[in-house]
Amino acid sequence: MSSGARLLASDFGLSFMWVWSGILVKIFVFGILGFGNEAVGEVVKGALSILNMFFFAFLGKITKGAAYNPLTVLSAAFAGDFSTFLFTAGARIPAQVFGAISGVRLIIHTFPEAGRGPHLNVGIHHGALTEGFLTFAIVIISLGLSRKIPGSFFMKTWISSVSKLALHILGSDLTGGCMNPASVMGWAYARGDHITKEHILVYWIAPIQGTILAVWTFKLLFRQPKEEKVNAKKKSE
């Protein structure tokens, strides 16, 4: 199997596992441990969510770049060449979407009481602004971590996980605080509303625009070291 095919298979697998992990955390906290919606239950759920993100960060590392979130690979693709962008948009993102859909379908078959996934609880424009802002924030944080502390896996994962959890809580009552179009697509497909204007605008277009804006903003504010060295060399000459 080629490296590209292995990466697609890994993307599919991680996306499948990611939607399952969220449900299993909820079942463990609220079903097995018996916590309600009180503060203790939410704290335990948050702690397990952070551990879960560490686990998936480790999986991404050992699979050499596999991901469960289209926005993660899309932000990297914008910084690469055109062939990388085509492979990401035409193959990796569909693999992640199919992985999430497959995972959600099995969840609904196994645990019918698991719920219906994230819902838009505000107006469409309010929701799009929320998801766009949340995505912009997490992409900026991710780009900053990759630039400032490139060698510290634990520290980068800790900051990224806590940031994602905080942003998720911030938007949970409005849009679900998803910041992951593939996972939302899985639940929307199961409900049959994956082609509605609300879903496409709030959970796809707005996050993609937030990602693009974050990449452009980061490039504008923080030039890469190589670019700085080249410019300094030209000035000295």
Image (cartoon, rainbow, N blue to C red):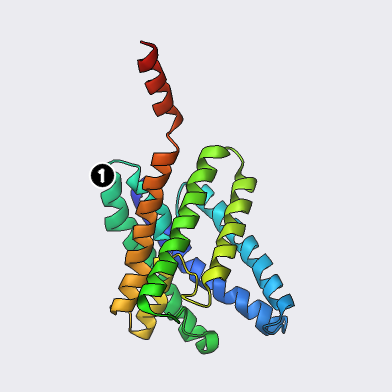
- Regarding mark 1 in the picture, which secondary structure is present there? helix
In this rendering, is residue 228 above or below 35?
above
In this rendering, is residue 72 above or below 199?
above
Q: Residue 108's x, y, as percent? A: 47, 84
Say if residue 164 shows up in the picture. yes
Residue at 29%, 56% (x, y): give it: 89
Q: Residue 75's x, y, as percent? A: 39, 50
Q: Quadrant of residue 220?
A: top left
Residue farthest along the top direction in this orientation: 237
Q: Quadrant of residue 184?
A: bottom left
Q: Which one is in front, 159 or 134?
A: 134
Q: Which one is in front, 59 or 57?
A: 57
Q: Amino acid at mark 1?
A: Ser
Residue at 41%, 19% (x, y): give it: 232
Q: Which one is in front, 100 or 154?
A: 154
In this rendering, is residue 38 above or below 136?
below
The number of callouts visible is: 1
* Circle 1 crowding by C-alpha within 10 Å: few under 14, some 14–19, many from 20: few
Q: Quadrant of residue 121?
A: bottom left
Residue farthest along the bottom direction in this orientation: 113
Q: Could you tell whether 85 is left or right of 175 in the image?
A: left
Q: Residue 55's x, y, as percent? A: 60, 58
Q: Residue 159's x, y, as percent? A: 61, 52
Quarter of the image containing the C terminus?
A: top left
Q: Could you tell whether 216 is left or right of 111 in the image?
A: left
Q: Which one is in front, 12 or 41?
A: 41
Name the residue tied to disc 1.
83
Say if residue 9 shows up in the picture. no
